[in-house]
Amino acid sequence: MKTMTPMTKEGADALQKELTDLKQVQRPKVIAAIAEAREHGDLKENAEYHAAREQQSFIEGRIQDIEAKLSNAQVIDVTAINNNGKVIFGSTVELVNLETDEEVIYKIVGDDEADLKIKKISVNSPIARALIGKEEGEVALVQTPKGEVEYEIVEVKYI
């Protein structure tokens, strides 16, 4: 049985856009580069040919990877869900570290979408696992390498 992987609509759209670019722009470019390199003669010592073949291999691998991810994705559009104040996959959560009073906002996304630089954390991360199912006003205890950290959930948005 296939296991479905949760993914936000935003993440699925980004993967679909990349897939379209790879198939309609990048693939034809590399095919043309291979054809041009073949015209230069001996393929054994033709660096352009080998570089183009390597690029083609990368593109084809990435296409297969994206297609597999999209076929196993369970796309969740959090904007279509009524906001009941609970932290769920796809929600944006405003937190306060109770020890330092530092405020932080995270969006809980799928593994492939996670990027801490833009405040998107994986649903499988320790902080997301501690937050899922909790409501505004509750305190979540997060296990970190430095010990336990308490976060109060200030606001939950479904955006």
Image (cartoon, rainbow, N blue to C red):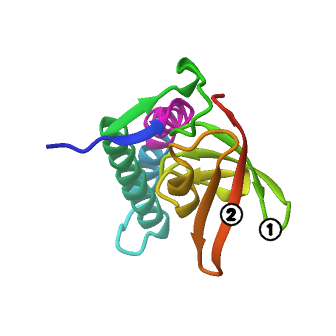
Under tag 1, what secondary structure?
A: loop
Residue 39 in view, yes or no: no
Q: Magenta span covers which residues? A: 8-28
In the shown orientation, is residue 15 left or right of residue 2?
Answer: right
Residue at (41%, 75%) from the top-left corner? 45
Based on the displayed image, in which of its 4 quarters is residue 91 positioned? top right
Task: Give the residue at mark 1.
Answer: 99
Q: Which amino acid type is shown beneath numbered disc 1? A: Glu
Front residue of 134/40: it is 134
Residue 58 visible: yes
* Label pair 2/1, CB-CB below 8 angstroms: yes
Residue of label 2: 150
Q: Residue at x 42, y 52 (%)?
A: 34
72 left or right of 8 in image: left
Q: Amino acid at mark 2?
A: Glu
Is 81 rendered above or below residue 49?
above
Pick out the residue farthest to the front: 138
Identify the element where label 2 is drawn. strand
**x%, y% of residue 110?**
48, 47
Question: Within 10 Å of the Cα at label 2, are there few (<14), some (14-19), or many (20+) other Cα atoms?
Answer: some
Along the viewing direction, whichever of 68 and 59 lies nearer the viewer: 68
Viewer-proximal residue among 96 and 51: 96
**Mark 1: few/some/many CA within 10 Å (<14, 14-19, 20+):** few
Of the two numbered discs 2 and 1 on the same chain, state the one appearing first in sequence.
Answer: 1
